[in-house]
Amino acid sequence: LDITNIVEYSHEVDIPGWCREEGSPFGEFHSEALQVPHGCRFGHINDRQLCNDYAHWKDAAYKQCKTKVVGDKRMSARSFAVLEPCGLDLFTGVEFVCCPGDEKTEADIKDASMKSVSQDPYFKLSDPANEHERFKEAQQRLEKRHRAKINKVMREWSDLETRYKKMKKTDEKGAEAFKREMTSRFQKTVASLEEENKEQKKQLEDVHEERVQAHLNEKKRQATHDYRAALAVQVGKANKHNVLKTLKTYIRAEEKDRTHMINRFRHLLRTDRDEAETYEPILLHQLRYIDLRINGTLAMLRDFPELERQVRPIAVEFWTDYRRENTPEVTDDEYTAIGGDEQNVKLVHYYKPAKTSSISGEDDEEEEEEEEAEVKEGESDDGGTSAEIKKQQKSESKKVAIEKIVQRKPGTKSEKNKPTTDDADAAGDEVNFAAFISN
C-alpha cells in the first residue's frame, strides 16, 4: 500500500476496497475543496517555512475567524482544510471559511433554505447528467413565482387607486393620509419581495455551483485513480499508451475545473462586484493549486525515466494547447502560458477592467452554455482527440454564437422575450401605480 500522507478528515468517509494492487485509491494529496456561502469569507495561512500538525492548523483557522468582523457581526469558522504536507501528519498551512456566528441569522438562513426546498423539486434531487437543464428550469419557475407575486401586488394598487379617488371626493384630507400610508406599506412590500427573490436566486446558484463542483471533483478523483493504475501496470510491462491517455484525461479534468472557476468569476464581475471581490483571492488560490497538482502528477513519471522521456513532452504540449484554447476570452500566450502565481494574477486582472460593461442576460446564457459544454466535453472520449480538431470545434461554436448575436437587431425582441398577458397586465398596473403616487 502506497500511503503518501496521513491527515484527519473533517468528516467520516467510507473507503470501499481499501487494499488494491495498484496502490492507494486516493492518489496524490489533495486539499479538500471548500464552499463559500453568501456572506462568508475565505482565508488561508500558508508558509513553507512552517510545518505543524493538523490540530495546530485547526486552532489557527478558528482563531483567525474569531478576529474577523463583517458588518458588525463577528465571524466563526464554518470549515477548513490543511494544505501541502511537509512531513508525516505535518502541513505547511490551512485554508478556511468564516461565516457570521449570529445564531438568529443562521436560523433564518435555515428557515429560508427549508422553504425553498419545499417549493421547488430542483433541491430534492441531484442529477449530474441533466444538472444544467434542471437548473435553468428551476430558474424559470422561480422567476414565474416572483412575477406572480409582483403582479398580485400591482393589481392591489389598481384597487387602491379606485378607492383613493372615491375617498377624495368626500374626504380629501383623509384620502391623502390613506395614500401616504398605503404608498409606504406597498413600497416596503415590493422591496421585501425583491430581496426575497434575490436571496432565493442566490441559494439556487449556490446549490448549482456545489453540484457542478462535486461533479468536477469526482472526474478529477477518477482520473487520478486511473492514472496511478496505469503507472502501476508500467512496473511489470511497458504501458506508454495507457499512461499518456490517462494523464491527458487528468489534465483535462483539472483544466475544466479551472475554466469553470474563471467563468464564475466573469459572471460575478457582471452581476455582483462585491461578491467578485470576495471570490478573487479564492480564485487565485485555487488556480495556484491546480497548477501544483498537475505538476505534481507529471512528477510521478520520474520513477520511470524512459517513460518520462517519451511521455512528459507530449503531456506538457497537450496541457499548453488545451489551456490556450479553453481559457475564456483570451488566446494570447501572455495570459494563457503555463506559469506561476504571477501569471494567474495577470489573467485575473485582464478580466477586471470590464466593470463598466453592460449586464446582459444573453451574454450570461451563452456563457452558461459554454460552461456546460466544458463540464460535459470529453466525458466519453478516450483522450486522443487532437488539438486541431478541438480548435476547429470551438471555432464552429463561436461562429454560431456570433450569428445569433448578429440576428438580434437593435430595437427588436425575439419571440421568447415577447411579453405574456400577465406581463402586459403588470406593466399596465405599474403605470397606474406611478400615476397614483404622483397625484
Image (cartoon, rainbow, N blue to C red):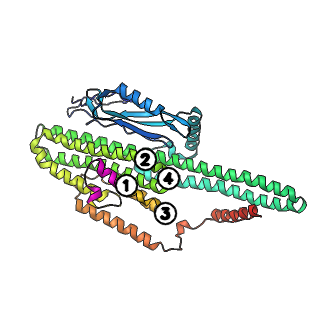
Magenta stretch holds residue 336: yes
| Image quarter of the C terminus | bottom right
Q: Nearer the viewer, residue 3 or 141?
A: 3
In percent of width and height, residue 265 lies at 41, 52
Query: What residue is drawn where x is 39% and y is 43%?
Result: 214
Q: Earlier in the sequence, mark 4 or mark 2?
A: 4
Query: What amino acid does circle 1 point to?
Result: His
Mark 2: secondary structure: helix
Q: Which of 185 and 314 is in front in this view?
A: 185
Q: Which of marks 4 and 3 is nearer the N terminus?
A: 4
Q: Name the residue under label 2.
A: 279
Q: Is residue 195 above or below residue 423?
A: above
Q: Mark 3 points at which residue?
A: 358
87 lies left or right of 10: left
Query: What residue is drawn where x is 20% and y is 51%?
Result: 316
Query: What residue is drawn where x is 48% and y is 31%?
Result: 66
C-alpha distance separating marks 2 and 3: 20 Å
C-alpha distance separating marks 4 and 3: 12 Å
Query: What amino acid does circle 4 point to?
Result: Asp
Query: What amino acid does circle 3 point to?
Result: Ser
SS majority, magenta: helix
Residue 261 visible from this viewpoint? yes
Magenta stretch holds residue 102: no
Residue numbers of the magenta segment? 333-349
C-alpha distance separating marks 1 and 4: 17 Å
Q: Mark 1 points at which residue?
A: 349
Q: Name the residue under label 4.
A: 272
Mark 1: secondary structure: helix
The mark lying in front, picked from 1 and 4, is 1
Q: Do the residues labelled 1 and 4 touch (CB within 8 Å)?
A: no
- Residue at the right extreme, as displayed: 170
